[in-house]
Image (cartoon, coloured by chain):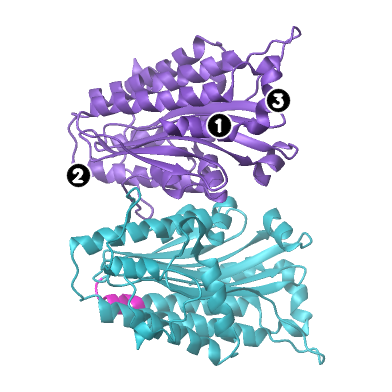
Chain colours: A purple, B cyan
């Protein structure tokens, strides 16, 4: 896998000073290597669950430094289109980031794994995951990420089960994480112009910066372990939902609704998603950024759901602050 | 048509001071009334050309002041989905506009007609038109607008003919308009992240502010007359292309390409179009803003066109600075 050594050898010359600091015992090389392994494991597991589709890889290089490998599965048994991207890029920190976070000029290194999966059946939810690490030559570093689920049709029992998985991934690290990051996901995945959430949420976190204790040790290893738990939760969680729901019967009417929900997914990603905006603004690789687009989407002017329908139930529950863990509909 | 008088009576109390100024002989009431008539004429003419589809109207009110009437045709003989919106809104000028144009705080009044039409056949182009007028209580006012064409398949003769219509609409007012506004359209309708233009362009102009001559007269009436010529050019131009091309044969492969081009249209509108962004940012009526979305769009990861194909010809000619008036392919 020559790509790994390429990134490591090219990407880090300016940050060697960091390795002398006690709080940087977890290096970006380790994090990057773990993300590469995560991409491998997720594509293997999801492809096995699908049973037919296999991931095809495109390795790419970034003009300003670094690159990635984008893996796409199309026309599977359960999945219509699934993208699992790894990237490790470095170079001059974009002015937008420096301004937004009030940081001095410095080079950056960023690595992560990004996933969006669009199933064939409207009864299987769309899923998204991202785990990422960002480091600057001035010593600033942070983790970010999350997993969120977008069912075309909300099944409250599935919603509860999904949030239980997210809570479990959080709770082994810190009992305050799940409530905090669940609320953050509700806020982040909110389509303001539609006054609805993208799906049933999940967890979202960003700028988790290591803090240094009085004795000079820091919690970077703990933060990384948390991000690893999130990454590891992805494949078993989604495999379960794929397997459980893909044989449920559905009609053309369900597919029509799925196409409209995919339209909302497009709206969120192109209008609101910060990762997408940042990628497109900074000349990222367009095909890798927009692998999140559904295979097909529809728009119907002023579409109204039938009163009492499953579509209405879904639409009414695309709202912030719903606690699926205790929701009576899931009992 | 009670909507007209409502806007006029409600929308203008704060700008009556303007009516005493010599350079404001063309009032916003006249402009608004002309735009309402334009919407009527365009929907009548396009519906007649389609032969089957009729426009359904939604009248709506804006929370902060004003409203509009959105007219949508779906499932016609030639058109799949066509939206023709009129609006006249007023209230506090959004901070974003004040900052962008370095203007002092003042209330605004804005009126315009916006159009996007998506045909059924991949052989008929998508078209967009907008004409608008903006006025502030501090006396600032301007016109903006344009028409641009997005063929799924570029026909160089059609491209030349379309640009001839745009040039004709410009030339009766000022021979410098067409070259200037053609270049502006090339820049505005550019999908940076795809390194391609949305279509074959057309004309685009904004912030055309009346200037006052030494004798105290201004050119507002001339600017308005130009905007009227643009508005009047829409229906005959598009009717001609609808009629000429809708019976051309096409296959599923052509429809597949059409769906991908519609995906790019979505990308432009949601990622880059200033009107869409502004509307969504300022709590505009979402369904009226997003009437521009195609009925259906597709995304295929890293799609490549066949060498020598009509798709390749189109892709290669989605570039700025192509002069269709003199292009040898159109001879």
Furthest residue toward top: A215
Graded by Cα atoms within 10 Å as few (under 14), some (14 to 19) or many (20 or more), the crowding at tag 2 reads few
- Main SS of the magenta part reads helix
- Chain letter of the residue carrying label 3: A
First reached walking from the N terminus: tag 3 or tag 2: 3
User: SS for tag 1?
Assistant: helix
The reply to whether the C-beta atoms of the residues labelled 3 and 2 are less than 8 Å apart is no
Residue in the image at 48% along x and 18% along y: A228
**At which x and y percent is residue B33?**
55, 77
In this figure, which residue is indicated by the disc labeled 3?
Answer: A17
Q: Nearer the viewer, mark 2 or mark 1?
A: 1
Q: Which residues are magenta?
A: B45-52
User: Observer-nearest residue: B87 or A288?
Assistant: A288
Q: Nearer the viewer, mark 3 or mark 2?
A: 3
**At which x and y percent is residue A282?**
57, 48
Q: CA distance from mark 2 to mark 1?
A: 52 Å
Using the rendered image of the protein, determine whether residue A232 is visible from the camera's viewpoint: yes
**At which x and y percent is residue A294?**
34, 44
User: SS for tag 3?
Assistant: helix
In this figure, which residue is indicated by the disc labeled 1?
Answer: A9
The quadrant in which residue B242 appears is: bottom left
Q: CA distance from mark 1 to mark 3?
A: 15 Å
User: Observer-nearest residue: B7 or B133?
Assistant: B133
- Chain letter of the residue carrying label 1: A
In this figure, which residue is indicated by the disc labeled 2?
Answer: A252
Residue B50 part of the magenta-drawn span: yes
Graded by Cα atoms within 10 Å as few (under 14), some (14 to 19) or many (20 or more), the crowding at tag 1 reads few
User: SS for tag 2?
Assistant: helix
């Amino acid at each position: 896998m020559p790509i790994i050594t390429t990134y490591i050898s090219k990407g880090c010359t300016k940050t060697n000073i960091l390795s002398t600091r006690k709080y940087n015992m977890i290096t970006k090389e380790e994090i990057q290597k773990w993300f590469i392994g995560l991409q491998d494991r997720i594509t293997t597991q999801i492809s096995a669950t699908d049973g037919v589709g296999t991931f095809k890889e495109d390795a790419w290089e970034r003009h300003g430094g670094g690159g990635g490998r984008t893996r796409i599965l199309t026309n599977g048994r359960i999945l219509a289109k699934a993208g699992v991207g790894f990237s490790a890029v470095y170079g001059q920190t974009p002015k937008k980031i420096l301004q937004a976070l009030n940081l001095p000029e410095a080079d950056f290194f960023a690595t992560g794994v990004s996933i969006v999966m669009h199933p064939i059946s409207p009864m299987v939810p769309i899923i998204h995951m991202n785990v990422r690490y960002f480091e600057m030559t001035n010593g600033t570093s942070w983790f970010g990420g999350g997993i969120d689920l977008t069912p075309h049709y909300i099944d409250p029992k599935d919603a509860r089960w999904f949030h239980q998985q997210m809570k479990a991934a959080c709770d082994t690290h810190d009992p305050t994480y799940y409530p905090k990051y669940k609320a953050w996901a509700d806020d982040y995945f909110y389509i303001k112009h539609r006054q609805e959430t993208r799906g049933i949420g999940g967890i979202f976190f960003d700028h988790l910066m290591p803090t240094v204790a009085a004795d000079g040790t820091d919690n970077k290893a703990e933060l990384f372990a948390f991000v690893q738990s999130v990454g590891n939760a992805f494949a078993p969680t989604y495999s379960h939902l794929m397997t459980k729901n893909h044989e449920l019967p559905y009609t053309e009417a369900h597919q029509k609704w799925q196409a409209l929900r995919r339209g909302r997914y497009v709206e969120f990603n192109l209008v609101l998603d910060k990762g997408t905006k940042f990628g497109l603004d900074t000349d990222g690789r367009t095909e890798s950024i927009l692998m999140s687009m559904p295979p097909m989407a529809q728009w119907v002017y002023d579409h109204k759901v039938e009163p009492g329908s499953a579509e209405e139930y879904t639409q009414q529950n695309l709202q912030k602050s719903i606690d699926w863990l205790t929701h009576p509909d899931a009992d």
